[in-house]
Amino acid sequence: TLTGARYGALGVLEPDQDRTEALYTTGMTEADRQRVGRLLPDRRAELPPEGGHAPGGPPARSFLTAPIQVHTELFGHLCLAEKSTGAFSESDRALLQVLAAQAGIAIGNARLYESARQRERWIEGAAAVTTALLTGTDAADALMTVAERARVLAGASAGVILQPTEAGGMEIVTASTLDDP
């Protein structure tokens, strides 16, 4: 490895940043992984000092961590432990910080790309609905297009068009489900 670390971990926080959503490790036994997972539940929890280890965690003579920031949001932490030659150096610390920064940039770019793709899908959906409404398609087919596009764009299992009844309730006009062709 670049730093000579025996253990590595990536803790990814939940969107609200209060708890660890996922933990990816290398070099650890399952028992160590379970202990490390319990150490990272709270982003405000104090990480162990470099050169030490957290109570309850796998013993480590050396420990190094760097936050992964995506823009101004804390996304998670990169952690290394147990350098084969003793303590981590300043160059190890700088390398881990660069890796964490690059990971944050890559994650931010992936999010921007997905956001752009989602906007593109919404524009395509709006165009399909507009086309259905303007091409003389009958109302039932146009409403089915609206229900289907809304379902697909929302990532839902069903899209439903409702209309109010004279009694003050609602009735289903049309619906699109995952089973629809």
Image (spheres, rainbow, N blue to C red):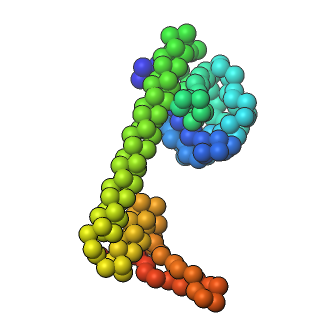
Q: Relative to 91, is 150 above or below?
A: below
The one of 136 and 35 positioned closer to us in this rendering? 136
Q: Which residue sits at x=58%, y=14%?
A: 87
Residue in view at x 51 percent, y 41 percent: 24
Question: On the rendered structure, is 47 left or right of 24?
Answer: right
Task: Name the residue at 47% across, 76% down.
Answer: 161
Report which quarter residue 152 is drawn in: bottom left
Q: Which residue is drawn at 40% across and 48% down?
A: 119
Q: Return the residue nearer the eye: 12 or 28.
A: 12
Left-right relation of 70 to 148:
right
Callout count: 0
Whether residue 31 is visible, yes or no, is no
Left or right placement of residue 112 versus residue 138 in this view: right
Q: Assign the C terminus to one quadrant of the image.
A: bottom left
Q: Quarter-wise, where is residue 90 in the image?
A: top right
Residue 66, located in which quarter of the rendered image?
Answer: top right
Residue 45's spot in the image, x, y percent? 73, 34
Q: Is residue 66 visible?
A: yes
Give coordinates of residue 154: x percent, y percent: 46, 61
Q: Nearer the viewer, residue 12 or 121?
A: 121
